[in-house]
Amino acid sequence: MNDPKPHNPKPDAIREARLATGLTQTQAAHVVRGSMRAWQQWEAGDRAMPPGLFELFMLKTGQWPLDGKAEL
């Protein structure tokens, strides 16, 4: 199965996802219950964003559809 969702989101993908929503770093961090500093580090590439948090952000902001199918 070809999965277009990144399992290890790169800083540019994280930044682009946030900008697509029009959210500030602080607002984006609140979406995933994270801190603004953590979000800054994820976008800067100083720290890897957990793939599950990226997926949560994408789902909660409507950028990825919630189709009800489990990923294996």
Image (tube, grey):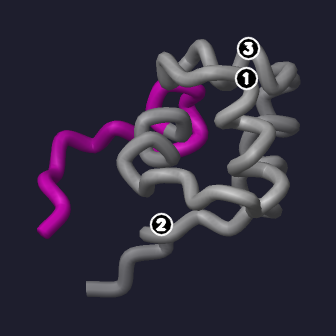
Three-letter code, disc 3: Gln
Q: Position of residue 2 (x, y in %)?
A: 36, 85
Compared to 21, does 43 lie above or below?
below
Q: Residue at x 73, y 14 (%)?
A: 27
Q: Position of residue 66 (x, y in %)?
A: 34, 38
* Residue marked by disc 1: 36
Q: Residue at x 28, y 43 (%)?
A: 67
* Residue marked by disc 3: 27
* Residue marked by disc 2: 5
Circle 2: element type = loop
Q: CA distance from mark 2 to mark 1?
A: 24 Å
Looking at marks 1 and 3 on the same chain, the residue that comes earlier in the sequence is marked by 3
Circle 1: element type = helix
Q: CA distance from mark 1 to mark 3?
A: 8 Å
Residue 68 among those drawn in magenta: yes
Three-letter code, disc 1: Met
Q: Nearer the viewer, mark 3 or mark 2?
A: 3
Compared to 62, does 2 lie above or below?
below
Q: Nearer the viewer, mark 2 or mark 1?
A: 1
Q: Nearer the viewer, residue 5 or 26?
A: 26
Q: Position of residue 53 (x, y in %)?
A: 44, 41
Circle 3: element type = helix
Three-letter code, disc 2: Lys
